[in-house]
Amino acid sequence: MSKGGAITWLSRDGNHPNMVNHADWGREIQMSDYSGPVPYIPPGAQVAPAWRGLGWNPVQAGDAFQHASRILHFAHGHTWLSVTCRPMQWPLKNYPAHCTFTTRLDLKGPAVQVDNIMINNRNDHKQYPARPQELPALYANGPYYFFYGYTGDKPFTNAPITCFDTRALLALARRDPTGTEPLSHAFHWMPRQLLPENWAAFANIKGHGFGIWAPRSYLWSSFFFGHPGIGGPKDSNTAYIAPNRNEILDYNIVFKYHYTLIIGSPVQVRNYVYAHAHPAAQPCWRFQNSRQDWTYHSTTDSGFPIRGCLHVHPETRGSFLLGPVWYWQATHCPVLYVQASFSHVGTTGYVYFRRFADAAFSPLELRPYAVNPDGHYRWYRINLAAAPRYRGAMVQLRLDLPQPTASDASINIKAISFRPPTRAK
């Protein structure tokens, strides 16, 4: 309770050690959100130079100057608790954020189900570009320096689990088991991982630890800080994992996400996910009351709340919508359907697709689509299977918009889907 409702303890029971690191207010397992501007320094505020580049960043536990967030509400039952706080801006000294964080924890056997809600109430109404979010940030103790997940392109088939490349950490732990050797560098960064089963796990050298399952999160960041293999909750040595998604956080948004913490080995974590996950073979994004994790380049929309569609204002040539990182097989999703209306724009746009093995979109991986810019809703059918490189596992879409032909150009998008509608043109 002294850290805004952030999770500071996770163990199998009271006789087993706590696995969560809470050496400062930026560790724990906690909410941490990001938006603009960068840097974010309101008049009279004092910023920590090391964290200036984070911009607008409310953190559940407190700030970099060790000022704790203020608890606004607390409730609990036999197997659950809920905490609402006013978080602190991490880079700023004693500067409460203009939002609230609520975390609800429900104990379910070897798992903790967590629901997080951020309610924003900023005075700055500008729609800032999307930024990667930590959903949430997780810090484990020094012994848990083995990172696991499934990195292949055949998820939910019991294909072999991957241990991230921690050879340098293992060598250091064996060479210096007591942590007395001076470190030439404290951070050990891991490459960002694409994990199509939506889970990752920490483990110690015996294979014990815990994991997190974060549905809808496919990109994960991780690092280790300090000496691997040693240290407790209040020591500086720590292992970090975060499921990431790019999100636009409007000044008044109600932003929700769910995740599950699972105690056990990486295999046990995966077995839990397999027993509870229901992956869809054909992704479908319907924009009834949210952006469904889609973001923008060189354009904006009408803001939150979303009312039945994305109302987009294409501002320049080159505006596009960027889909969330996902997973699907091209054979299951040959045709993309877009329900939209177009006004005062050109008649041609493009859909780019990104393959599982590609780090970025390629100009070789696209299909044109024709639109009728008369302002009426239609279903547009885009045959991606006609593209020679649309084969195998896919992870992302990009919808390039037709060029605006007038200052009042507008596009309304109700759905982007691989599931055929009743009618499609």
Image (cartoon, rainbow, N blue to C red):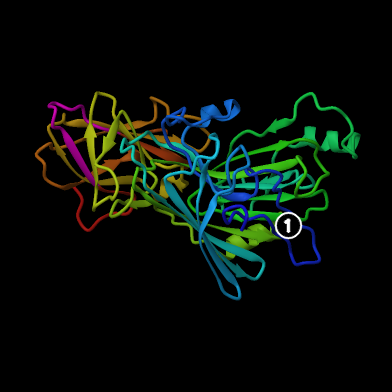
Magenta part mainly helix, strand or loop? loop
Residue 236 lies within the magenta run? no
Residue at horizontal 20 percent and vertical 39 percent from the top: 411
Identify the residue at horizontal 23%, vertical 53% (top origin).
308
In the image, is 93 to the left or to the right of 56? Answer: right
Question: Is 405 in the magenta?
Answer: yes
Residue 219 or residue 93, whichever sits in front = 93
Tell me how many marks there are: 1
Q: Residue extending furthest left?
A: 374
- Where does the image place residue 317, in percent across and percent down from the top left? 25, 23
Residue to which mark 1 is pinned: 265
Please, which residue is most extreme toward the bottom here? 78
Label 1 residue SS = loop
Residue 151 visible within the image: no
Can you give x and y, in whole percent of width and height, for residue 191 in the image?
63, 33
Q: Residue at x 62, y 55 (%)?
A: 2
Q: Quadrant of residue 350?
A: top left
Residue 297: name its quadrant.
top left
Whether residue 32 is situated above or below residue 187 in the rendered picture: below
Tell me if 222 is positioned left or right of 82 in this view.
Answer: right
> Does 309 sit left or right of 405 as displayed?
right
Left or right: residue 329 versus residue 352 is: right
x, y percent for residue 33? 49, 43
- Closer to us: 247 or 126: 126
Q: Relative to 225, say whether 362 is above or below.
A: above
Q: Which residues are magenta?
A: 400-413
Kindly identify the amino acid type of the residue bearing the numbered disc 1.
Ser
Determine the image quadrant of residue 241: top right
